[in-house]
Image (cartoon, helix red, strand yellow):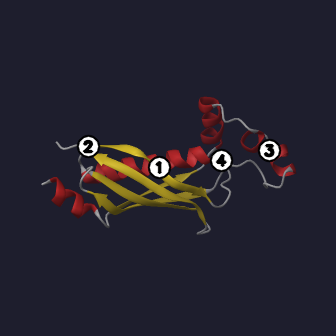
Amino acid sequence: MMRDFLNGLVGTSAVFSRTVSETDVSGFAQITGDDHPNHTDESYARSVGLGGRVAQGALLVGFIAGASSRYLEQVGRPAVSYGYDNVRFLNLVGIGDRLEIIYEITGVDHAKNNAAATVHITNERGELVAAGTNILHFTSS
């Protein structure tokens, strides 16, 4: 039964959209301590060639978690994240950027009851800003 369920996941997907806000970046800095001037000081970020403050990479991983939550709502079966692999940040994300997180199941591991999702994050200009893999572990009930 689990085998059939997992096989049926391959190719299914969810999309999560989010506009990066000032509150996202400053709140994440406060919660995590990732308060580097790249994220918190507009003049500094401009002076080092970033064009302005940028979102933390780990915040983008948090958006991947949001996409996995949307995916699990669709599937209606309990699972937990077993981690993120090969996450890469490919372009800067600034405050006000509109992101689309596409979360697609691309493989399964029957022995472990796991599914692997390929994740692509693009901005409103269609640029790929981050990519990686999320592993979901489905419980047997």
Instruction: From the viewer's perspective, tell me whether residue 106 is left or right of residue 84.
Output: left
Which residue corresponds to the image point at 65% horizontal and 52% vertical from the top-left? 96
Distance (Cα) linking label 4 and label 3: 12 Å
Which numbered circle lies on residue 78? 2
Which of pointers 3 and 1 indicates the residue nearer the eye? 1
Mark pair 4, 2: CA separation: 30 Å
The residue at which mark 3 appears reads as 42
- The mark closer to the camera, 1 or 2, is 1
Marked residue nearer the N-terminal end (4 or 3): 3
Q: Amino acid at mark 2?
A: Pro
Per the image, label 4 sits on a secondary structure element best described as loop
Query: SS for tag 3?
Result: helix
Q: Residue furthest left?
A: 1
Mark pair 1, 2: CA separation: 18 Å
Q: Compute the Cα span from label 3 to label 1.
A: 30 Å
Quadrant in the picture for the N terminus? bottom left
Give the residue drawn at x 62%, y 68%: 125
- Residue 15 pos. (x, y %): 42, 59
Judge depth for marks 4 and 3 and give the one in front: 4
Determine which residue is flagged by label 4. Answer: 55
Q: Specify which label sits upstream in the sequence, 1 or 4.
A: 4
Which of marks 2 and 4 precedes in the sequence? 4
In percent of width and height, residue 137 lies at: 31, 46
Marks 4 and 2: CB-CB under 8 Å?
A: no
Distance Cα–Cα, label 3 vs label 2: 42 Å
Could you say which is closer to the camera, residue 70 or residue 86? 86
Residue 52 placement, left or right of 87: right
